[in-house]
Image: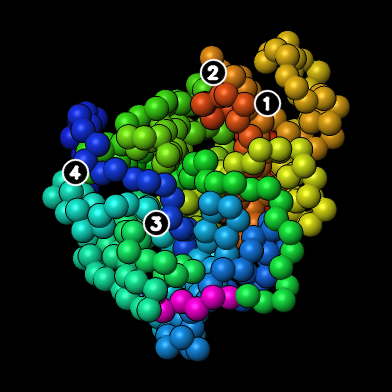
Amino acid sequence: MSEKEPNTGTLEAPEDFLPINGTDYIEWYVSNARQAAHFFQTSFGFQPLAFAGLETGLKDRESYVLVQDKIRFILTSPLTGDTAIGKHIDRHGDGVKAIALWVDDAAKAYEETVSRGAISVFEPFSEEDVNGKVVRSAIKTYGDTIHVFVERKDYHGAFLPNFKPWNPTYQPETVGLKYVDHMVGNVGWGEMNTWVNFYANVMGFNQLVGFDDKDISTEYTALMSKVMSNGNGRIKFPINEPAEGKKKSQIEEYLDFYGGPGVQHIAVATDNIIETVISLQARGIEFLKVPTTYYETLLDRIGSIDEEISTLSSLGILVDRDDEGYLLQIFTKPIVSRPTVFFEIIQRKGAKSFGKGNFKALFEAIEREQILRGTL
């Protein structure tokens, strides 16, 4: 956490002073953006969109932009030594640096949040090219992660000014990913409520739900989590912190290897999780698996569903139900060298929750991976 503390008063958020249209992009700092782009194209079906680097006038970095439906990733690497990007990678490994939020007025978003205690990363500035202009500003959140406010109503180019369209020959098919459902942040011991209050008071979010160590625990490990959402519900940020357990939890493992707080996983939605998972497995993506006994009493717990249990069992897809319907979800193993960042694939059939009924089975699966890594 930064030396300056964010505003941490009550949780009341009486007005939506920070209207957000959705997730604009997620920027990763990676050691080799070209290879990372190839990975996301090949394994996850992302499509090439734009590029910036030496050819576009940048001297210190290059960035590849990938898209799949409403999901946009920027993959950025340094071009020289001793850069802020390189230092970020040295400390954290490949990971998410910026969560960019699409707003109508980036200057107003900046003013509203900074006036409420947000720490500035950069003030609003305008970027222009022949396709129009984009205004961006940014504030700090947990760890070295930042939020960028993006105003693009006056821009009609491929991505951002000073990016050129990227249209390589290699363009594998998509796998049916639609949009970012939620993004989970891991923070340190006793810091969850600090950042819950930050999102409530600085950004006007509301708490949707909370889970304590009684909800999220196994024989060995535990964690606590609260889910924050913006006014229109398009942005959801669960915040996790460790809880006392017999052994090192997945959150502690993440904090150790990431070097502090950061984005743990990105949940991406699909309209057909079975087809998406089959495609991802065929492309080499590995998923956490739960014991087949999970499926023996599944229908007793969640009731009737459209999918065949045998199909879900063969793929390792989990199911949970709430008052609004049910959801299907599955989690990849870490996609980077360190045991840090991973993906969740989720399909919602009415459910608005986050799979509480699957927590125990999921975390036991993660513990089995920790045992293999020797970090439990």
Residue at image coords 42%, 85%: 58
Up/down of 352 relative to 314, above or below: above
Residue identified by numbered label 2: 324
Badge 4 or badge 3: first in the primary sequence: 4
Residue identified by numbered label 1: 319
Task: Categorize mark 3 by other alpha carbons within 10 Å: few (<14), some (14-19), many (20+).
Answer: many
Question: Is 364 or 332 nearer to us in this picture?
Answer: 332
Up/down of 77 relative to 225, above or below: below
Q: Are marks 2 and 3 in contact (CB under 8 Å)?
A: no
Q: Start and end of the magenta stretch?
A: 161-166
Q: CA distance from mark 4 to mark 1?
A: 38 Å
Q: Which mark is residue 352?
A: none
Type of amino acid under label 1: Val
Label 1 vs label 3, nearer the camera: 3
Provide the secondary structure element on which disc 1 rests: strand
Q: Are marks 4 and 3 in contact (CB under 8 Å)?
A: no
Type of amino acid under label 4: Asn
**Can you name the residue that lies furthest to the left here?**
115
Q: CA distance from mark 4 to mark 3?
A: 21 Å
Task: Categorize mark 4 by other alpha carbons within 10 Å: few (<14), some (14-19), many (20+).
Answer: some
Label 4 vs label 2, nearer the camera: 2
Type of amino acid under label 2: Glu
Question: Any magenta on residue 66?
Answer: no
Residue identified by numbered label 4: 7
Q: Position of residue 128 (x, y in %)?
A: 32, 76
Up/down of 109 relative to 231, above or below: below
Q: Position of residue 246 (x, y in %)?
A: 56, 33
Q: Which mark is residue 100?
A: 3
Badge 4 or badge 2: first in the primary sequence: 4
Q: Position of residue 293 (x, y in %)?
A: 80, 23
Question: Is 331 or 179 nearer to us in this picture?
Answer: 179
